[in-house]
Image (spheres, helix red, strand yellow):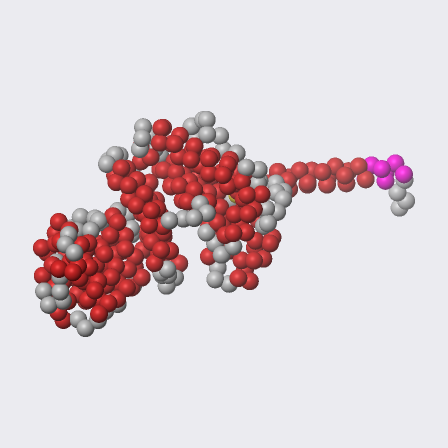
């Protein structure tokens, strides 16, 4: 059958229209973003699956997986920074907006804390305003949320509390010279203030505890056996007094991290658990962390001083002896020169 010129034009027109329709649906379902794989997005926004893909790539111990991911997503850091600053701070947010903010913040933070952090930070800087404008935006967001909660983040919805928690962690990741000990002290201050609000919601408090836990692991250069194991620990870490229970954990890294955090959070009714763990420990790093935690309970020195002096006489480990002497000195507020190992 011969196709006439008129039919050919008609068929061509139909094909063009069909392609335009298909293109419209493709673009409307997954907008094209320069330097970001379409699989990470849904309607131009970072999807839940995209967020998980970022975390999986960053946490991968296999560099052959991370580098190709970052190469395929060279514009990801800029895109995430843009998505955050595109959220209007002038209006009160709904739950979906707060959840999206948390998702984007978490993704950018993981990139900034990953193996290629310097590269990611440079890409954030290449975006208009760079990390300083982003930091200004995040600070303004936290202040706005505090005002909405009458000074307490815990007064907000759970989604908003989570968003603030992600914002303060991202802010810290933008800092070129992080002081982990100072960060931990600040977290304890925020935690104490928020706990005094007694709002009934503990979402923000739990965010702060998780932040402190992961920061402490970084400070001590500790690694847990597996991601699943680490998540199980965090799932049961809801309040600072849970640190006491974690001293009895079978994993050494958990015990060490718990001891390190006890020294700054000083939860109640913990001195007995510290004393018991010190007696059975043979690991000097763990012993020293436990002794540092004991220092925070000077008002209860009578409960541990006799035991410390007994351990001092029995041990032949000179490093351990010096640490015990230092602890007794701290508990009593007297110079080390007045204390001998025969006390």
Does the stretch in magenta take in 6? yes
Residue 45 part of the magenta-drawn span: no
Q: Nearer the viewer, residue 182 or 252?
A: 182
Residue located at (61% from left, 47% from top): 35
Left or right: 183 in relation to 278: right
The percent coordinates of residue 130 (x first, y second) are: 54, 40
Q: Is residue 293 left or right of residue 104?
A: left
Residue 322 position (above or below residue 174): below
Total number of numbered discs in the rendering: 0
In this view, which residue lies farthest toward the top?
90
Residue 125 visible in the snapshot? yes
Quadrant in the picture for residue 21: top right
Residue 198 lies left or right of residue 210; in this view the side is left
- Rendered-image quadrant of the C terminus: bottom left
Residue 168 image point, x, y percent: 40, 41
Which span of residues is magenta-colored?
A: 5-11
Quadrant of residue 250 within the rendered picture: bottom left
Q: Is residue 69 left or right of residue 208?
A: right
Q: Quadrant of residue 185?
A: top left
Outermost residue on the front side: it is: 337
Secondary structure mostly seen in magenta is: helix
Measured as percent of width and height from the top left, residue 100 is found at 47, 39
Reply above or below: 209 against 154. below
- Residue at 42% x, 28% y is 92
Q: Position of residue 88 (x, y in %)?
A: 49, 30
Q: Nearer the viewer, residue 197 or 226?
A: 197
In the depicted view, which residue is nearer to us: 215 or 53? 215
Q: Residue at x 28, y 64 (%)?
A: 285
Q: Residue furthest bottom?
A: 316
């Amino acid at each position: 059958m011969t196709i006439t010129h008129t039919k050919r034009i008609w068929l061509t027109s139909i094909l063009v229209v069909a392609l335009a329709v298909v293109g419209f649906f493709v673009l409307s379902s997954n907008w094209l973003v320069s330097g970001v794989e379409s699989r990470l997005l849904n309607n131009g926004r970072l999807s839940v699956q995209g967020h998980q893909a970022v975390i999986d790539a960053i946490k991968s111990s296999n560099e052959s997986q991370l580098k190709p991911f970052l190469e395929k997503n060279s514009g990801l850091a800029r895109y995430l920074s843009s998505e955050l600053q595109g959220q209007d701070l002038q209006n009160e947010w709904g739950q979906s907006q707060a959840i999206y903010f948390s998702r984007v913040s978490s993704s950018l933070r993981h990139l900034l804390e990953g193996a290629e952090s310097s590269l990611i930070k440079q890409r954030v800087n290449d975006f208009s305003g760079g990390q300083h404008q982003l930091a200004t935006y995040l600070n303004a967001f936290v202040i706005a949320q505090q005002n909405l909660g009458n000074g307490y983040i815990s007064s907000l919805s759970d989604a908003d509390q989570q968003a603030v928690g992600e914002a303060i962690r991202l802010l810290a990741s933008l800092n070129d010279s992080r002081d982990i000990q100072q960060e931990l002290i600040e977290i304890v201050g925020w935690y104490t203030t928020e706990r005094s609000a007694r709002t009934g919601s503990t979402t923000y408090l739990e965010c702060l505890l998780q932040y402190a836990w992961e920061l402490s692991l970084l400070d001590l250069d500790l690694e847990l056996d597996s991601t699943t194991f680490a998540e199980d620990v965090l799932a049961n870490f809801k309040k600072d007094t849970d640190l006491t229970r974690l001293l009895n954990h079978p994993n050494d890294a958990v015990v060490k991290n718990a001891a390190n955090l006890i020294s700054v959070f000083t939860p109640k009714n913990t001195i007995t658990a510290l004393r018991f763990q010190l007696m059975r420990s043979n690991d000097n790093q763990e012993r020293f962390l436990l002794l540092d935690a004991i220092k925070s309970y000077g008002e209860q020195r009578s409960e541990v001083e006799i035991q410390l002096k007994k351990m001092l006489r029995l041990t032949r480990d000179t490093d351990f002896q010096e640490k015990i002497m230092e602890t007794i000195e701290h508990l009593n507020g007297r110079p080390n020169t007045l204390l001998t190992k025969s006390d």
